[in-house]
Image (tube, rainbow, N blue to C red):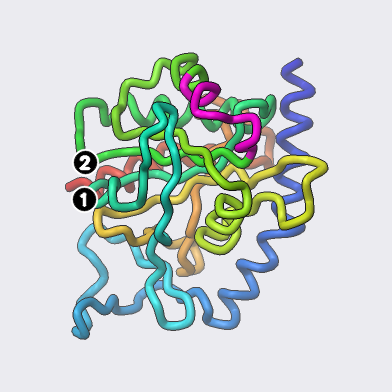
């Protein structure tokens, strides 16, 4: 079973690498997504990059913010991006019937949530890419199965096209394209959002923004040489920077 799971994870990572990474790379070399060391603009005035050391993701001269969204959560409450205002939070796209990367993703998010337990300024936004199956009742049972206690961790469902647009165009976190309904797939990455709704990032060794964090690699995984390593530890560090 474990072997099949890791084969599935490897397949998802391969698909992501073939489809998505070239697009991100092309945006970087075209300066659609800026490199590090830039200035951030607020209120018409340039200011230095925030003292937390995490850069803003800039596309075509605009710092990327979370797009407006509004979906139902596991309690059938309407949740929007405004509910996360003033909070540092993580974004993921998943589905409850997933038997591969969603499992380590959910366990990693649970571990992260526990580290910031009791903080009202930290949250998680989990969007289902399988809304026909993942009704509020199903999401509520899923939340219970992971013993989620953070009141700011919402599992959301809604119109498939809107969720697809939010993932692919709002975050560039790849999920099924329009008309591609045969299989469900997603990147297995987490996005980090600051209290003002900006997508934030640390820099890679080459000075380029690293927009996402690997959420699909278990924290305690034995990684073979050349394999994908866990980024949960550095994600926790960056959350702490934004919370300070």
Determine which of the numbered discs, if any, sits on residue 211 in the image.
none
Is residue 132 one of those drawn in magenta? yes
Q: Residues within 10 Å of mark 2 (few under 14, many from 20)?
A: some
Residue 50's place in the image compared with 103, above or below, is below
Residue 132's place in the image compared with 75, above or below, is below
Determine which of the numbered discs, if any, sits on residue 121 in the image.
2
Spatial separation of the CA atoms under disc 1 and disc 2: 7 Å
Residues under numbered marks 1 and 2 in contact, where contact means CB atoms less than 8 Å apart = yes
Tag 2 secondary structure: loop
Image x and y of residue 5, in percent: 73, 25
Residue 221's place in the image compared with 51, above or below, is above
In the rendered image, which residue does mark 1 sit on? 86
Q: Which residues are magenta?
A: 130-140
Image x and y of residue 107, in percent: 49, 24
Name the residue at 34% across, 45% down. Answer: 89
* Residue 136 in the figure: left or right of residue 103: left
């Amino acid at each position: 079973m474990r072997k099949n799971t890791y084969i599935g994870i490897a397949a998802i990572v391969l698909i992501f690498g073939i489809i998505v990474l070239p697009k991100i790379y092309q945006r970087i070399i075209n300066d659609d997504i800026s490199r590090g060391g830039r200035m951030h603009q607020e209120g018409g005035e340039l200011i230095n990059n925030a003292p937390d050391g995490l850069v803003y993701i800039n596309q075509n001269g605009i710092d990327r913010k979370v797009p407006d969204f509004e979906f139902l959560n596991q309690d059938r409450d309407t949740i929007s991006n405004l509910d996360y205002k003033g909070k540092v939070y993580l974004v993921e796209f998943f589905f409850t019937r997933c038997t591969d990367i969603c499992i380590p993703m959910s366990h990693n998010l649970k571990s992260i949530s526990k580290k910031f337990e009791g903080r009202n300024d930290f949250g998680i936004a989990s969007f289902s890419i399988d809304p026909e199956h993942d009704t509020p009742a199903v999401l509520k049972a899923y939340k219970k199965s992971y013993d989620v206690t953070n009141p700011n961790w919402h599992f959301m469902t809604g119109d498939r096209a809107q969720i697809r647009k939010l993932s692919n165009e709002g975050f560039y976190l790849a999920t099924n394209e329009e008309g591609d309904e045969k299989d469900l797939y997603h990147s297995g990455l987490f996005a980090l959002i600051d209290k003002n709704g900006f997508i934030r990032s640390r820099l890679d060794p080459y000075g380029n923004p690293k927009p996402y964090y690997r959420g699909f690699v278990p924290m305690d995984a034995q990684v073979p040489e050349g394999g994908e390593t866990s980024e949960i530890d550095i994600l926790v560090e960056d959350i702490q920077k934004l919370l300070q």
